[in-house]
Image (tube, helix red, strand yellow):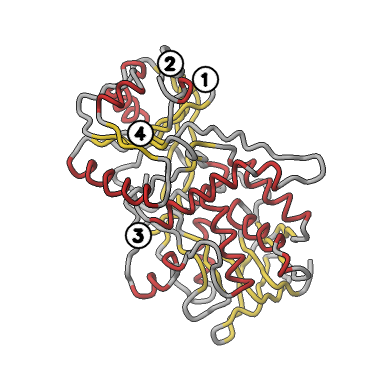
Amino acid sequence: MKRHYDVAIIGGAATGSSVAYFLTANSQFKGASVAIIEKDPTFKLAATSLSSSSIRHQFSNPINVQIGQFGSRFIREFAETMRVDDDKPDLSFIENGYLFLAATDEQTQVLRDNYEVQKRCGADVVLWTADEVKAAFPHLNVENLRLASYGQSGEGWFSNTGLMNGFRKKARRQGADYIVNEVVAMNREANRITDIRLASGERIGCSFVVNATGTGATRIAAMVDLVIPIEPRKRTLFVFDCARSPQGSATVNNGQLPLMIDSSGIFCRPEGTCFLAGTTPNPDPAVDLDDFDPRHDEFETIWMGLATRSKNFEAIKLINYWAGHYDYNTLDQNAIVGPHTEVRNFIFANGFSGHGLQQSPAIGRGIAEWIIHGEFKTLDLSLLGYERVASGSPFVEKAVI
């Protein structure tokens, strides 16, 4: 551990390690030093590890569509890009797409509006009538459906820990230092962070600090009297077996089923020979940082909703379940990315509201660009900046699951 680092990244899961990778991969940053400080090297409770690890292009804002498009390309090339000697991390990207179902006038209009945004960005998305949904996925009950949106390529799911560990291993090879410790304080002089104090007692000087701590982001920001509208929200995921599995019954995508977002808010996708499902709880309160108790009662809601949508889901058996956290942005459910408006060397990578894993490649690249060049070079992420938090001006994303 050095006494001073050019960049200190707090949080070493997918987003923090992505920042470290893109910094150390940039030829204009050669000779600079990067430290990733992570208190739990097992990542047992990290959002990365407990996520449903999916990626999509079907968003309502162009920047989120473009972030997803870059993420898909990056995931496809991940094994070669992250190669270290003979180790080529395979993320097992299953490109089965997302299927959004609309049953009300409001849901239908949202899908139409989002579709226009997605097509302008070049996303491979189609709108289907209820009959077209039935033709593609014969197991579904489409009686109450008015419209559907289907991503034909670039969307699907992949290995969450594979992405994180690939970033970590490559960043280390490129010179990043991983420090197992906890940040307990930071020193701020006027509008600049000068150093970090660790639980072990050491102090580390730094030129930039990146806050990539997920639901811990609010606590880290408060150490230097900064405020962000982020709180932990709990999501429970269930894995179940199906007596009459519909997998393989589709007439598109070689018979494989997509990740379905039902009009009820329930989502479901294949997971090997089983299925993974979840829903947005109602009510959806903030929870304690150490509250990872699954909400068991949600399974009955999911079961009833899925059985209504498909008779194949009437007879299912619960196999596994767990709860994870969203770093939920209460302002607008969009990520906060880039420097604070006054403390310019304090960089946010927070508030992803469930999209952090899939957005980590583009966000890591963007933050690295801002640190090195003082601006975003590839994708302009300025709409996700802290300025909107300071002014209380939401940049709303309508397609939040």
Asked which quadrant contains residue 98, the reply is top left
- Residue type beneath disc 2: Ser
Q: Which residue in the protein does label 1 denote?
A: 273
Residue at the farthest top position? 244
Residue 386: give x, y in percent of width and height. Answer: 44, 70
**Quarter-of-image position of residue 106:** top left
SS label for mark 4? helix
> Disc 4 residue type?
Glu
Q: How far apart are the alpha carbons under marks 3 and 1?
A: 36 Å
Q: Secondary structure at mark 1?
A: loop
Secondary element at tag 2: loop
Residue 298 shows which numbered tag?
4
Spatial CA span between label 4 and label 2 = 21 Å
Of residues 92 and 285, the one nearer the viewer is: 92
Q: Is residue 258 above or below residue 9?
A: above
Mark closer to the chain start, 3 or 2: 2
Look at mark 3 in the image and give the residue it sits on.
332
Q: Nearer the viewer, mark 4 or mark 2?
A: 2
Q: What is the C-alpha distance between the residues marked 2 and 1?
A: 8 Å
Whichever of labels 3 and 4 marks the residue nearer the N terminus, that label is 4
